[in-house]
Amino acid sequence: MGIRNRDYMKRPSDGDDERASEPDARLEGFFSAFLEKHPKFFRYSGIALVAIFILTIVLAKALSGAH
């Protein structure tokens, strides 16, 4: 019996593609629902990052000027 006669070599691998993409589809669905529920998430996150960056610069200048 050669390797080409084995059963698993003859079966189609269609089921593997569905299982591999299922977590991606669930993750995409989660993010889609989250962004639909919170449409301004990236705007507020960007504003918070800029504020933290500015605060860090101000604190660094204030602490370096104290010495």
Image (spheres, helix red, strand yellow):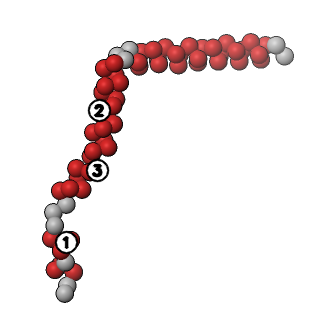
Total number of numbered labels?
A: 3
Q: Secondary structure at mark 2?
A: helix
Q: Quadrant of residue 58?
A: top right
Q: CA distance from mark 1 to mark 3?
A: 20 Å
**In the image, residue 25 lies at what x, y percent?**
27, 39
Q: Which residue is mark 2?
A: 29
Which one is earlier in the sequence, the residue at label 2 or at label 3?
A: 3
The answer to whether 20 appears left or right of 43 in the picture is left
Residue 46 as seen in the image, left or right of residue 35? right
Q: Which mark is residue 20?
A: 3
Name the residue located 65 percent from the left edge and 18 percent from the top edge.
56
Quadrant into which the N terminus falls: bottom left
Residue 35 appears in which quarter of the rendering? top left
**Residue corresponding to mark 1:** 9
Q: Amino acid at mark 1?
A: Met
* Amino acid type at mark 2: Gly
What kind of element bears circle 1? Answer: helix
Horizontal side, residue 67 vs residue 28: left or right:
right
Which residue lies at the image location 71% right of the left edge and 18% below the top edge?
A: 60
Check whether the beta carbons of the residues at disc 1 and disc 3 lie within 8 A of each other. Answer: no
What residue do we see at 26% from left, 51% from top? 19
Task: State how far apart marks 1 and 2 are (Cα).
Answer: 34 Å
Q: Position of residue 27 (x, y in %)?
A: 33, 36
Q: Is residue 67 left or right of residue 46?
A: right
Q: Residues within 10 Å of mark 2 (few under 14, many from 20)?
A: few
Amino acid type, label 3: Ala
Mark sitting earlier along the chain (1/2):
1
